[in-house]
Image: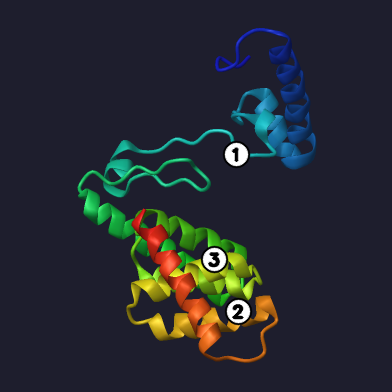
């Protein structure tokens, strides 16, 4: 019986499947002594039918007020009550940027890309974020995305401008099979930077 599921054929299927998984959990997951204790009523193992995945989570309201709520792969985050909107933006940027750098150093490029893009959602004018995000895509050989991000990093200038421009030229030449440099290539790269700037202003 699940109060969160309305009665109907699908509910019957879910109930049958849940009961099968409960039996599997008691016989194959937990030690026999634990399973026997549950069957005798000495203890209660909650949500045995969801032994193969997380099902529900209880959080302290005091914890949420102090630290906010940030669950993996959730659609939203709640900020701690004492933080201003500006402080919350800074916190999210620092959090995702730090995680991105960790994944980048570990050569886990898809995770680095994900974290940097999350940081850029809340901090859209940070050239360092665009540079590091561009590196994560560049090292993963996703050159179109890398070119766009690095072009934005160059446009925004900052301390990574020279590095971003060098990496932008390197991957543009790789992507297009260019073996030489010169005024024509620099003109193309400058056009990419200007186009990136126009996107940032939208």
Residue 92 on image: x %, y %: 36, 56
Q: Secondary structure at mark 3?
A: helix
Q: Nearer the viewer, mark 2 or mark 3?
A: 2
Residue 14 on image: x %, y %: 71, 20
Disc 1/disc 3 C-alpha distance (Å): 25 Å
Q: Residue beneath label 1, please? A: 54
Q: Residue at x 41, y 72 (%)?
A: 153
Q: Nearer the viewer, mark 1 or mark 3?
A: 3
Foreground residue, 172 or 3? 172
Q: Residue beneath label 2, please? A: 171
CA neighbours of label 3 inside 10 A, class few (<14), some (14 to 19), many (20+): many
CA neighbours of label 2 inside 10 A, class few (<14), some (14 to 19), many (20+): many
Residue 181, can we see it? Answer: yes
CA neighbours of label 1 inside 10 A, class few (<14), some (14 to 19), many (20+): few
Q: Residue at x 38, y 72 (%)?
A: 155
Residue 4 on image: x %, y %: 55, 17
| Residue 144, quarter of picture | bottom right
| Dots 2, 3 in contact, CB < 8 A | no
| Residue 108, quarter of picture | bottom right
Asked if 197 appears above or below 106 in the picture, the reply is above
Residue 102 on image: x %, y %: 50, 71
N-term mark: 1 or 3: 1
28 relative position to 143: left or right: right
N-term mark: 2 or 1: 1
Disc 2/disc 3 C-alpha distance (Å): 19 Å
Residue 103, can we see it? Answer: no
């Amino acid at each position: 019986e699940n109060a969160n599921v309305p009665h109907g054929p699908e509910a019957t299927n879910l109930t049958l499947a849940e009961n099968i998984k409960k039996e599997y959990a008691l016989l194959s997951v937990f030690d026999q002594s634990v399973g026997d204790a549950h069957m005798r009523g000495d203890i209660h193992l909650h949500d045995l039918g969801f032994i193969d995945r997380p099902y529900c989570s209880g959080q302290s309201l005091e914890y949420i007020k102090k630290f906010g709520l940030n669950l993996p792969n959730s659609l939203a985050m709640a900020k701690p009550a004492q933080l201003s909107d500006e402080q919350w933006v800074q916190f999210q940027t620092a959090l995702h940027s730090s995680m991105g750098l960790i994944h980048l150093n570990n050569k886990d490029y898809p995770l680095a890309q994900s974290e940097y893009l999350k940081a850029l959602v809340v901090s859209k004018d940070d050239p360092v974020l665009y540079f590091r995000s561009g590196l994560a895509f560049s090292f993963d050989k996703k050159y179109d995305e890398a070119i766009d991000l690095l072009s934005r990093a160059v446009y925004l200038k900052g301390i990574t401008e020279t590095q971003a421009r060098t990496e932008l030229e390197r991957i543009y030449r790789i992507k297009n099979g260019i073996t030489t440099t010169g005024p024509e290539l620099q003109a193309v790269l400058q056009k990419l930077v200007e186009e990136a700037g126009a996107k940032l202003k939208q």
